[in-house]
Amino acid sequence: MTKTLNPLHFEDLEPHRFEDLVRQVVYYFRNWASLEPTGRLGSDDGYDARGFEIVTEEVDIDSDERIDDEEDTESDLKQERLWQIQCKRERAITPSKIKQYVRDMIPETSTVPYGVVFAAAADFSKKTRDTFKEELRKKGVKEFYLWGKADLEDVLYQPKNDHLLYAYFGISLQIQRRSQRSKLRGVLAIKRKAIKHLGPIDFNSFKEVLLRDIDDEQYPYSDRISHFKKQPAWKMYFFAGHEQIEGVGLYGQNHLQAE
């Protein structure tokens, strides 16, 4: 049976918790030298986190060129790209509002980051997404991502982020899958035992079988149950064969009962 999950309620998270969630999602987004939560104590300069991405560039070296200091050479090959991350726990963001947010993130006199991630607990319209791209291109930003509710859900439902899904929303798809696998293994184990003791599939042995509740503390003292004759808590049947889906077929008092 397939269970359908309800939409995740990002808007129910406390603002700083939403920021924490987005920052932890971004953690594996790039190879960071550092990822800083700049918005936790206010005065965030228009963004909630910043990251410095490590980028290694290939440099052609002539065969006759000597490298005296390998450590200095390696440091020269590495660069850091600045990313800004902004989070808004809002249910609706219009094109005009996203334009203002971009301007607040990157004022005219500020350093232009290489990349921007803007995440919100909202569903963005096409016009809002187009405005976001247009404004950041004007600013000279090279990479930019606008994550709405659907985007964040897609990321959180990935197996690598199952721990975040559980930590923030109490849902674990991995635990559910393990539970389903365990249940299936249990059913198969019981089926194998039934085949071992009653006979193989497509085999009718009419072997006598006792059917009872293993948790019934009265067994085998039927005299302790006043209504035992009308409603027996255990009874002997004859095995009629394995059912195609689950269980076995049993005969009892001239009628078939599937258990």
Image (cartoon, rainbow, N blue to C red):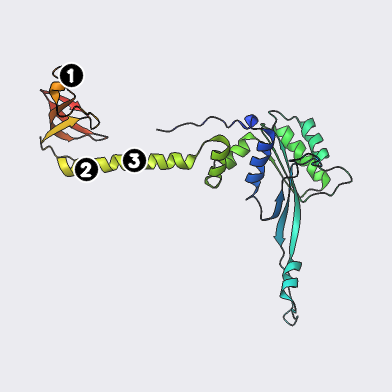
Helix, strand or loop for disc 2: helix
Mark 1–mark 2 distance (CA, rounded to whole Å): 28 Å
**Numbered tag placed on residue 231 in the rendering:** 1
- State left or right for residue 179 relative to residue 57: left
Dot 1 surroundings within 10 Å: few (below 14), some, or many (20 or more)? Answer: few
User: Disc 3 designates what residue?
Assistant: 184
Mark 3–mark 2 distance (CA, rounded to whole Å): 14 Å
- The quadrant the N terminus occupies is top left
Dot 2 surroundings within 10 Å: few (below 14), some, or many (20 or more)? Answer: few
Tell me the amino acid under the disc marked 2.
Lys
- State left or right for residue 161 relative to residue 251: right
- Mark in front: 1 vs 2: 1
User: Disc 2 designates what residue?
Assistant: 193
The residue at 23%/44% (across/down) is: 192
Helix, strand or loop for disc 3: helix
Tell me if label 1 and label 2 are in contact, CB under 8 Å.
no
- Mark in front: 1 vs 3: 1
The residue at 51%/32% (across/down) is: 5
Dot 3 surroundings within 10 Å: few (below 14), some, or many (20 or more)? Answer: few
